[in-house]
Image (cartoon, helix red, strand yellow):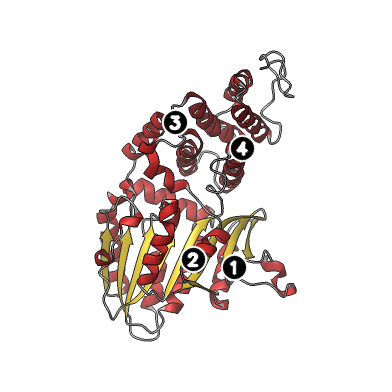
């Protein structure tokens, strides 16, 4: 075991690294993760010390990345992840309110298509699947505070045929969102009246996990045309229960099932710490740099999103496999689009292409934001060269990319 004064690393106590050097956070964090994997205690302590000197929750994206990953790595080394995570959650829930949560989401949607990309594509697919139907039932499994649905209500209000009746069932398993459901319902009902759309709000808030959802709670009627929208929901399901949940959704015989998930794989390498760490670092590096470019430096909403990431990172890397935290740990178990596609196909779903009209709406959306965002099809052909590639196909979904990196996957499916 090496002493802290004779490190083989290119960084030593006498070689401080200025915060202006590019990508220093990833370099030091990777070295620290490698030292943890090798159980090199002297090197671990030295790198944790160096990261602590350079990191800051109020600096640039590298300093913030270092700060939040340092917190998670320290929890892993000291086996304090569970305590730390519970503290972070308690503080977050104490300061949570409908107004602050809505303000954060709406600001995020204003400066970045990270959320609105899925909303626009999903709404387009749902409206087309339910066209000419008079009794609609949308089952929304998400924690987006219903910010997706006002534009859909506007579209229903302007349909050429008679305005349909809409039942919106919202399923939430998140404690802090459950507490807001009454206010969310009141606002949705008020907006539906304004739009002249007959509307029924059916919240389901008595679940601890999505696998507990039963058909009876959904209040499905025989003459209803059903659409199911899962936005960031499937990753909250325990890995061993995901196929059963997908089968349950199929049993509802929806006209369309829309899936929105962030493009990351946090399950394949769970038992290989370095590979797992690399994927976490890759995803959150993209996310933090995106936030830095999209928001003003002093934005409170940006700080809120970063703190949410800090809780996720501690949960992913610092908590190990404590059984007491098993349910919470599942909420960060992301899979990539190709993995979700395989699960859906194995359970009897068939992929559905997005129409040209929906694709045009998505393209128009991206033009509203700063350069750097683009659309990528399932085959990997970007929107700009799709016509040149005969294999260009969005039958298994489309990706939102940032700086040419896929970050969000959206797809539509039929049973």
In three-dimensional space, the C-alpha distance between marks 3 and 1, rounded to whole angstroms, equals: 42 Å
Position of residue 206 in the picture relative to residue 240 (left or right): left
Q: Which residue is mark 4?
A: 274
In three-dimensional space, the C-alpha distance between marks 2 and 3, rounded to whole angstroms, equals: 34 Å
Position of residue 210 relative to residue 223, above or below, is above
Looking at the rendered structure, which numbered label has been put on residue 363? 1
Q: Which residue is painted at 40% across and 49% down in the image?
A: 103
Q: Nearer the viewer, mark 3 or mark 1?
A: 3
Give x and y (percent) for residue 193: 27, 70
Q: Nearer the viewer, mark 1 or mark 4?
A: 4
Q: Which residue is painted at 50% across and 43% down in the image?
A: 302
**Mark 4 or mark 2: which comes first in sequence?**
4
Q: Nearer the viewer, mark 4 or mark 3?
A: 4
Q: Which residue is mark 3?
A: 81
In three-dimensional space, the C-alpha distance between marks 4 and 3, rounded to whole angstroms, equals: 18 Å
Say few, some or many: other residues with alpha carbon within 10 Å of mark 1 (under 14 / 14 to 19 / 20 or more): some
Say few, some or many: other residues with alpha carbon within 10 Å of mark 2 (under 14 / 14 to 19 / 20 or more): many
Looking at the rendered structure, which numbered label has been put on residue 344? 2
**Mark 1 or mark 4: which comes first in sequence?**
4
């Amino acid at each position: 075991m090496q002493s802290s004064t004779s490190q083989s690393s290119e960084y030593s106590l006498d070689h401080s690294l200025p915060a202006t050097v590019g990508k220093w956070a990833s370099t030091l964090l990777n070295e620290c993760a490698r030292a943890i994997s090798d159980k090199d205690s002297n090197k671990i302590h030295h790198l944790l010390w160096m990261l602590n000197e350079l990191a800051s929750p109020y600096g640039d994206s590298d300093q913030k990345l270092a700060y939040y990953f340092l917190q998670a790595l320290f929890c892993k080394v000291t086996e304090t992840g569970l305590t730390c995570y519970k503290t972070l959650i308690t503080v977050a829930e104490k300061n949570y309110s409908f107004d602050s949560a809505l303000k954060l989401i709406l600001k995020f949607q204003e400066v970045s298509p990270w959320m609105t990309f899925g909303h626009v594509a999903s709404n387009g697919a749902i409206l087309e699947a339910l066209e000419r139907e008079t009794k609609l039932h949308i089952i929304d499994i998400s924690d987006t505070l219903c910010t997706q649905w006002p534009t859909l209500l506007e579209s229903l209000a302007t349909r050429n045929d008679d305005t349909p009746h809409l039942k919106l069932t919202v399923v939430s398993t998140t404690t802090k969102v459950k507490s807001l459901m009454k206010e969310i319902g009141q606002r949705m009902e008020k907006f539906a009246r304004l739009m002249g759309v007959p509307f029924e709000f059916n919240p389901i808030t008595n679940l601890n996990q999505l696998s507990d959802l039963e058909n009876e709670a959904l209040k499905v009627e025989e003459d209803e045309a059903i659409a199911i929208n899962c936005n960031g929901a499937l990753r909250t399901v325990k890995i061993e229960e995901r196929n059963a949940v997908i089968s349950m959704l199929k049993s509802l015989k929806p006209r369309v099932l829309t899936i929105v998930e962030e493009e990351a794989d946090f399950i394949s390498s769970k038992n290989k710490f370095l590979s797992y760490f690399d994927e976490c670092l890759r995803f959150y590096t993209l996310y933090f740099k995106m936030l830095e470019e999209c928001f003003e430096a002093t934005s409170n909403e940006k700080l809120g999103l970063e703190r949410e990431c800090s809780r996720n990172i501690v949960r992913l890397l610092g908590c190990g496999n404590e059984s007491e935290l098993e349910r919470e740990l599942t909420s960060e178990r992301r899979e990539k689009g190709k993995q979700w596609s395989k699960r859906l196909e194995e359970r009897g779903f068939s992929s559905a292409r997005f129409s040209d009209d929906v694709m045009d709406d998505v393209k128009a959306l991206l033009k509203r934001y700063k350069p750097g965002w683009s659309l990528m099809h399932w085959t990997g052909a970007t929107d700009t060269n799709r016509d040149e590639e005969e294999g260009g196909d969005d039958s298994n979904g489309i990706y939102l990319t940032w700086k040419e990196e896929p970050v969000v996957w959206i797809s539509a499916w039929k049973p």
